[in-house]
Amino acid sequence: MQQFEDRVAVVTGAGSGIGLGMARAFAARGMHLMLADMDAGTLDAAVAEFTKDGVRAASMTCDVSRLEEVEALAQATLDTYGGAHVVCNNAGVGIPTSARNMKLADWEWILNVDLWGPIYGVKVFLPLLEAQDEGHINATSSMAGLISSQMMGAYNVAKHGVVALMAAVERELRAKKTNVRASVLCPGPINTNISRNSVTLRPGQAKPKADGDKAGKVAANIQAALEEGMHPNDVGELVAASIAEDKFWILTHPRYAKAVQKQLDALNDDQTLTRA
């Protein structure tokens, strides 16, 4: 079972939203923090919050789509604390655009952040955890990693990849009989600014005109659902509790698993694809 007191948690996308919720949950359990985000301002505010409460917290800006920056994050963690014990590859972006009309630049951006970010996190941090034979590595996927909806093509692909990545890692760790474990977070609607932040961070120009109106409506519906969603602090508590219990699947909205079951039933019964 993973211990928290006086251990070190590394969280990406930690300046706000789910990442900050995770950091708060880990801090409440006595962990020291290394926080990473693209936004230096939110990182500074987070570190100030934790320091005020007597929590050891450090931070650095990090673009998880760049291997060298993830490597720098690991080195900063080692330099500051001497090790890492819980690593949460949480940073993510997403924009509503159809798979057939999405620009290749947007495909590359979303896959680089949402999938290559966790891949780099596993590549860089997992050997550190295995060397000390203690630790837990987590990545944030989505319910979109279990069932694909329309108008979120690249996001669906990336998040399915994250589920596959972490399942492979967990099976390999258990086969080696190591004390290191892995898990995947598949959240439903959470009250975060991921949509607005993604628009701000998105490189390049606007969406293709063919997607303009429909994508705009989907984006508005997504934002409305997020604003009614679970509080990020509650997600953080769920993640910390699940890690303590060695759970692999971390679902914020277990009832949504029914949609996954319907898809599996259709696959088995007549090989059709259910609506999502």
Image (cartoon, grey):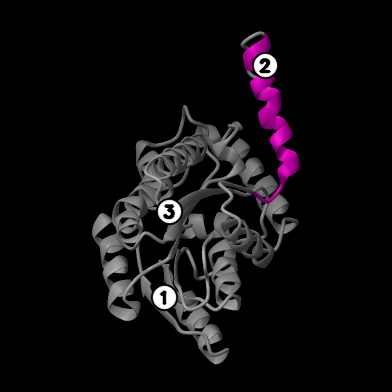
Q: From where the camera sits, is residue 204 visible? A: no
The residue identified by callout 3 is 202
The 10 Å Cα crowd at callout 1, few under 14, some 14 to 19, many 20 or more, is: some
Distance of label 3 from label 2 (alpha carbons): 36 Å
Quarter occupied by the N terminus: bottom right
Please, what is the three-letter code of the amino acid marked with disc 3? Arg
**Which residues make up the magenta segment?**
251-269
The 10 Å Cα crowd at callout 3, few under 14, some 14 to 19, many 20 or more, is: some
**Numbered disc 2: secondary structure:** helix
Distance of label 3 from label 1 (alpha carbons): 17 Å
Frontmost of labels 3 and 1 is: 1
Q: Who's the residue at 32% across and 52% down the image?
A: 120
The residue identified by callout 1 is 40
Residues at discs 3 and 1 in contact (Cβ within 8 Å) = no
Task: Return the x and y of residue 196 as percentages of the image width and height.
Answer: 56, 58
The 10 Å Cα crowd at callout 2, few under 14, some 14 to 19, many 20 or more, is: some
Task: Please state which of residues 198 and 235 is positioned toward the viewer in this rendering.
Answer: 235
